Amino acid sequence: MVFRVEISPQAFGDLDDIAGYITERGSFESAQRWFNAIMDAIRTLRKLPGRCPAAEESKAVGTEVRLLLHGRRGHSYGVYFAIDYETAMVRVFHVRHWARKPLNADEFEDLMDEQ
């Protein structure tokens, strides 16, 4: 089964913020490479999105949310998404640097509501 991948406005905002940070600390070219690479990683969710583990934070809200990790040590990013098997849709709703503190239940629910 091939899934359609939808990226929420919140997730696009996250991607834009991260790319801006990379541009400030490095260069536009490095931010562009990062953005293209993470978008390629997100596109892989079209096939077998269930290969990614459930996010630890999803236990607090009782909804299955999965986590795609992208990057290498020290530069990893988590892509949070939900799978709707009935509509064959993957909804990406948040992207964050792996070193950031985990989302609490309220933050997680707010992000899910914005889908």
Image (cartoon, rainbow, N blue to C red):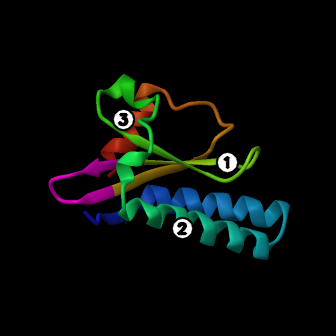
Residue 7 visible in the displayed image: no
Q: Nearer the viewer, mark 3 or mark 1?
A: 1
Q: In this view, does 29 lie to the left or right of 45?
A: right
Q: Which of marks 2 and 1 is nearer the N terminus?
A: 2
Amino acid found under the numbered disc labelled 2: Met
Note whether 85 is above or below 61 in the view shown. below
- Classify mark 1: residues with Cα within 10 Å, few (<14), some (14-19) or many (20+): some
Q: In this view, does 102 lie to the left or right of 67?
A: right
- Residue 76, labelled with which disc? 1
Task: Tell me the SS state at disc 1.
Answer: loop
Crowdedness of circle 3 by 10 Å Cα count: few (<14), some, many (20+)? some
User: Of marks 3 and 1, which one's residue comes earlier in the chain?
Assistant: 1
Residue 86 vs residue 14, the one in the foreground: 86
> At which x and y percent is residue 30?
77, 70
Q: Write the start and end of the magenta stretch as one range.
A: 81-90
Please give the name of the residue rendered at 25% of the width and 63% of the height, measured from the top-left corner. 1
